[in-house]
Each structure stands twice: as structure tokens, then as C-alpha cells.
Amino acid sequence: KRAAEILTVSPSLVYALVASGRLPAVRFGTGRGTIRLEEADVQSYLEATRVKVPVEHEFRHLRVS
């Protein structure tokens, strides 16, 4: 849940990112078990997926803060 909060996505998307290998995680136990993520890995994923918008490009429908 905490990773989903950091990424501002649903917990199910976090599970999908882990299952696809795009977000590193450690699974404890058998079957469904428990998934643990390092906060540094979550932050790295967040930074790697950040979109860089050129300054000269104008989006009238988006507000940039």
C-alpha cells in the first residue's frame, strides 16, 4: 500500500509492475506470500518514469506546477 501511495497509483498496479519485473521486489513465503519493496527501488522507478516536457512545448490542456 505504501508503494502505491508514493507512486500515486492503485495497489493492483504495483502488483502488476512487480509481476512484469519493472519494479523489483522480494517475495517471502509460498503461494501468494508477502511482497516487500525497497523504498529506494520505488523512488528509482518513479524517477525513471518521469516525463521530461520541453519548456518550449505548450500544452493548453495541462497545468504544470
Image: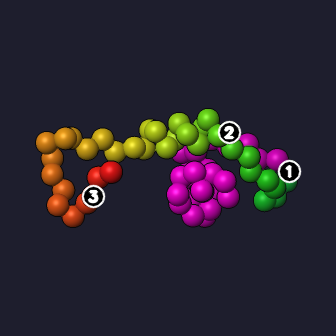
Q: Nearer the viewer, mark 2 or mark 1?
A: 2
Residue assigned mark 1:
29
Residue assigned mark 3:
63
Sequence-wise first label, 3 or 1 = 1
Sequence-wise first label, 2 or 3 = 2
Magenta residues, start to end: 1-28
Secondary element at tag 2 = loop
Q: Are marks 2 and 1 in contact (CB under 8 Å)?
A: no
Residue 19 in sight from this viewpoint: no
Q: Using the image, tell me which numbered label, if any, was put on residue 38.
A: 2
The answer for how far apart the CA atoms under marks 3 and 1 are is 45 Å
Amino acid at the residue labelled 3 = Arg
In the drawing, does residue 63 fall left or right of residue 55? right
Rendering coords of residue 51 (x, y %): 34, 45
- On the rendered image, what quadrant is the N terminus found in? bottom right
Instruction: Please tell me whether residue 53 is drawn above or below residue 60 in the rendered image.
Output: above
Secondary element at tag 3 = loop
Q: Are marks 2 and 3 in contact (CB under 8 Å)?
A: no
Q: How is the image coloured?
A: rainbow
Q: Nearer the viewer, mark 2 or mark 3?
A: 3
Q: Nearer the viewer, mark 3 or mark 1?
A: 3
10 Å neighbourhood of mark 3: few (<14), some, or many (≥20)? few
